[in-house]
Image (cartoon, rainbow, N blue to C red):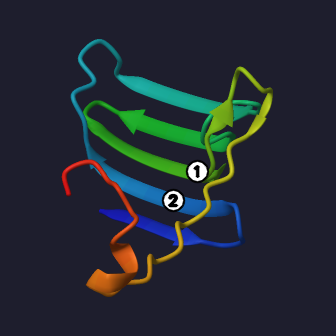
């Protein structure tokens, strides 16, 4: 089972339950809060044998390590289709 819902502009909540290949642990409990990395936020995991339940509240953005800030993704604007006569002076690759 897997559930994800966006709860704000940059935050999402995620719940997953199921089986994973935990080979060496009988019981695992993992709680962490991280920042300044991709998908930073609160993470909680409980695993018993191969069964697990994971809950996350995280930032959907990626961290730019070179700039030390969040990467902002802007959707490109749709290009207008030009008539053939309007493109006479345009030189493009693969034209």
Q: Residue furthest top?
A: 24
Q: In this rendered view, identify the residue nearer to me: 6 or 46.
A: 6
Q: Is residue 1 above or below residue 69?
A: below
Q: Residue at x 54, y 52 (%)?
A: 55
Q: Residue furthest right?
A: 68
Dots 2 and 1: beta carbons under 8 Å?
A: yes
Label 1 element class: strand
- Could you tell me how many numbered marks the image carries? 2
Q: In this rendered view, identify the residue nearer to me: 74 or 26.
A: 74
Label 2 element class: strand
Q: Is residue 57 above or below residue 83?
A: above
Q: Residue at x 71, y 69 (%)?
A: 9
Q: Position of residue 29 (x, y in %)?
A: 54, 30
Q: Residue at x 34, y 55 (%)?
A: 91
The quarter of the rendered structure image containing the C terminus is bottom left
Q: Earlier in the sequence, mark 2 or mark 1?
A: 2
Q: Which mark is residue 14?
A: 2
Q: Position of residue 53 (x, y in %)?
A: 42, 48
Q: In this rendered view, identify the residue nearer to me: 20 or 6.
A: 6
Q: Position of residue 68 (x, y in %)?
A: 80, 27
Q: Is residue 44 above or below residue 21?
A: below
Report whether 62 appears left or right of 83.
right
Q: Is residue 17 above or below residue 21?
A: below
- The quarter holding residue 50 reads top left
Q: In this rendered view, identify the residue nearer to me: 7 or 81.
A: 81
Q: Position of residue 64 (x, y in %)?
A: 68, 31
Q: Which mark is residue 56?
A: 1
Q: Which mark is residue 66?
A: none
- The quarter holding residue 41 reads top right
């Amino acid at each position: 089972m897997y559930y994800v819902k966006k709860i704000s502009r940059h935050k999402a909540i995620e719940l997953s339950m199921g089986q994973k290949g935990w080979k060496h642990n009988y019981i695992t409990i993992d709680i962490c809060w991280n920042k300044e990395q991709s998908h930073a936020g609160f993470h909680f995991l409980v695993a018993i044998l191969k069964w697990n339940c994971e809950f996350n509240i995280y930032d959907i953005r990626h961290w730019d390590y070179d700039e030390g800030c969040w990467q902002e993704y802007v959707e490109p604007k749709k290009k207008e289709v030009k008539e053939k006569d309007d493109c006479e002076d345009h030189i493009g690759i693969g034209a």
